[in-house]
Amino acid sequence: MDNFMNMGRQDQEAFLMKPIIEQLKQSGGQASTKDLKRAVVESEESIPANVLTSYKTSRNGRRYLPFNYAFNFAVSNLIMADMLERPKLGIVTLTEKGRLFKGTGTDLSKSFYKLSLPLWQERSRNNKELKQTTNNVKENDETDSDIEEEWKSNLLHALLNLSPGKFELLCRALVTKMNVDIDETIGTKLTGDGGLDGYGYIRTDDFRTARVAIQAKRWDPNNSVSSPEIDKFRGAMDKFRAEYGIFITTSTFTRDAIKASRAGTRVITLIDGDHLLDLIAKYELYVTKKVITTYELDDFFEEEN
């Protein structure tokens, strides 16, 4: 099968439609677009693991994720073909037609284009008429998705410019926000801490406390974390008798790394670059919320280490 990144834009959209339906079936028929996107990338070997953090710069200087365009259009195509519906913002649901579909990707794209092309053409005409009759509509109006991609790109760039020690500090701060009590004596030195970048304790119920090991890798998004890194981290967990592991990176994880994290009796939680940006926003960690979909980076990223 051709590598997804070597396909034309329309071919990418057509390719994604069937995995989107399959992953929705596996998740019970409904999912957030964010979770669905991640599931599709993980399930399709022809899609590079780093597409969720591979930003590009447009001619007007805006940074964007090319994969988002193909994925979002594929979802829109399926909605137009009555395979999906969007009950509310950020959520998609299979329709009866989508649930019953059992054909190939080629069958799906053919049936879609018969239904959707006239709708796209009508939408294009309506947009042109709106631009001609409305003076305050600009050619390059920003959408919520564009704004979100831009601030996330800025945040990822800032994370990559942190020193290794400061990135580890941020990761420990994040894990603290997630209710882990950090041990001040283990994993807080840059060297000589047995392969850990943090260690702590979390109460799993009213009386039981579990040991948590933390690994932080500030890696280039094009350099995915592989399974040997997971095995090495699990060895460090053994050394300190940790029941849980959290592996955080600015990059992504290979499919073998994901499998390795789920093997054995202790599953390791993986937080890749895309998920890390979401968590920093969720806990407002060194970022300040400005509007619904964007954040302003605090001085933490600008100050000397």
Image (spheres, rainbow, N blue to C red):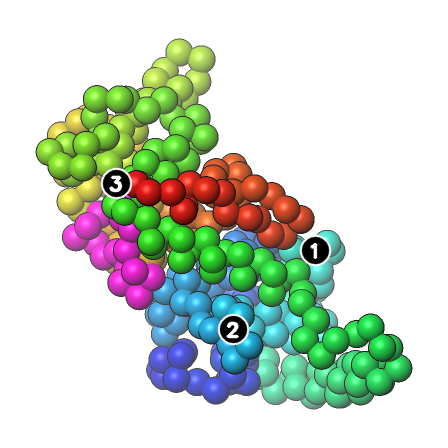
Q: Mark on residue 89?
A: 1
Q: Position of residue 214 (x, y in %)?
A: 28, 36
- Is residue 70 in the magenta section? no
Q: Which residue is mark 2?
A: 61
Can residue 225 be seen in this snapshot?
Answer: yes
> How crowded is the residue under tag 3: few (<14 C-alpha within 10 Å), some, or many (20+)?
some
Task: Please indicate whether residue 163 sits to the left or right of residue 138 in the image.
Answer: left
Disc number for residue 165: 3
Quick check: is 226 in the magenta stretch? yes
The quarter of the displayed image where residue 20 is located = bottom right
Q: Could you tell whether 114 is left or right of 172 in the image?
A: right
Alpha carbon distance from label 2 to label 1: 28 Å
Q: Helix or strand or loop: what does disc 2 sit on?
A: loop
Image x and y of residue 220, in percent: 30, 60
Tell me the residue at 26%/32% (across/down).
Answer: 198
- Residue 130 shown left or right of residue 167 in the figure: right
Residue 32 pos. (x, y %): 59, 54
Instruction: Tell me the mark number nearer the camera, choosing from 1 and 3.
Output: 3
For the record, the magenta segment spans 216-230
Q: Residue at x 70, y 55 (%)?
A: 89
Residue type, numbered disc 1: Leu
Amino acid type at circle 3 is Gly
In the image, residue 265 above or below residue 202: below
Image quarter hosting the C terminus: top left
Image coordinates for residue 134, horizontal then vertical, percent = 86, 77
Q: Nearer the viewer, residue 136 or 229?
A: 136
Tell me which numbered mark, 2 or 1, is placed earlier along the sequence: 2
Judge by depth and name the residue closer to the eye, 50 or 106: 50
Q: Mark 2 or mark 3, which has the lower sequence index?
A: 2
